[in-house]
Image (cartoon, grey):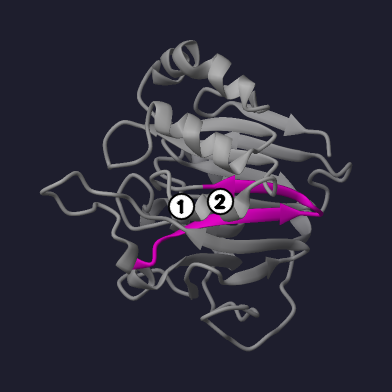
Amino acid sequence: MKFTKRTKIIFIVGSVLLASAAIATPTTLILLNKNKDVTVNLLYNAGVMIEANGLRIYIDPIDLAYSYNELPADAVLITHDHGDHFQESTIDRIATDETIIAMPEIVAVTTTLEGVISVAPEDSFLIGSINVTCFYMYTFAPLGYESSHPIESNYVSYLIDIDGFVLFHSGDSSNIPEYSQLQNKVDVAFLPLGPGCQTMTGIDVVYAIDMIKPTYFIPIHYAPDANTDFILIYGTSIENCGCEIIDLEYYETYVFAV
């Protein structure tokens, strides 16, 4: 089936304000998670697919197998424009004419995708019954270098609030001071292991977890076997923060019974 694109009109709270209208939910998805479970599918690199409340949300999907064409998106959320997080061809395959596609303004003004909404840190909007809040995402540069994710770019991370169960996708962020605002407000934190890209890595991930204090931590953005090595070194420290590690391989699924 061939889908066409059209502009989605939703209400944004924050620096971006568009007209409000009802957001349609494709009837083909209405039976998803009818028992209120929240299903997480870890995709490649930093990609995540979340299914809850009859809706399907993708964050930073790239290099998806063609089987995902049968799992259309109600929303696609993009943190920034680096190629390991933003891939127009993948978005085009999973988007329908009802899909909400949100991304930072610096990305939205250059994309060829249609119906995109621009977002910035502290914006919030609804995807059906699910509330999405954009948060800060940037990195610190070593002395003598420029940041690979400058704060001036207004890149975003995302807080996904599903009936009070909150998932946080940090994108490529370093361990930033703004994480103090999230303390005890996050149930599941997706944080990168790096290295590279100036993201948090090693002990910085532990410090971020200790600051945010999520109930669960799911590693993303890791090289082959790096997740296993990381947990061997830092697993006890993370558990001492009162956080449970859910270690998923790429394309593995985990269901939270909410």
Crowdedness of circle 1 by 10 Å Cα count: few (<14), some, many (20+)? Answer: few
Q: What residue is drawn where x is 53% and y is 50%?
A: 179
Instruction: Check if mark 2's residue and mark 1's residue have beta carbons within 8 Å.
Output: yes
Separation of marks 2 and 1 at Cα, in angstroms: 6 Å
Please state which of residues 243 and 67 is positioned toward the viewer in this rendering: 243
Q: Is residue 178 magenta?
A: no
Quadrant for the N terminus in the image: bottom right
Q: What range is drawn magenta here?
A: 153-169
Residue furthest bottom in the image: 19
Q: Residue at label 2?
A: 180
Residue 151 visible (yes or no): yes
Q: What residue is drawn where x is 83% and y is 34%?
A: 257
Quadrant for the C terminus in the image: top right
Q: What residue is drawn where x is 49% and y is 75%?
A: 115
Q: Main secondary structure of the magenta part?
A: strand
Crowdedness of circle 2 by 10 Å Cα count: few (<14), some, many (20+)? Answer: few
Above or below 129: residue 160? above
Q: Residue 203's x, y, as percent?
A: 41, 27
Q: Residue 87's x, y, as percent?
A: 36, 52
Residue 44 visible (yes or no): no
Tag 1: amino acid:
Pro
Q: What residue is drawn where x is 42% and y is 13%?
A: 229
Q: Is residue 159 magenta?
A: yes
Q: Could you say whether the residue bearing mark 1 is in a helix, strand or loop?
A: helix
Q: Using residue 57 as the reference point, say whether residue 52 is left or right of it.
A: right
Q: Residue 147's x, y, as percent?
A: 23, 53
Residue 177 marker: 1
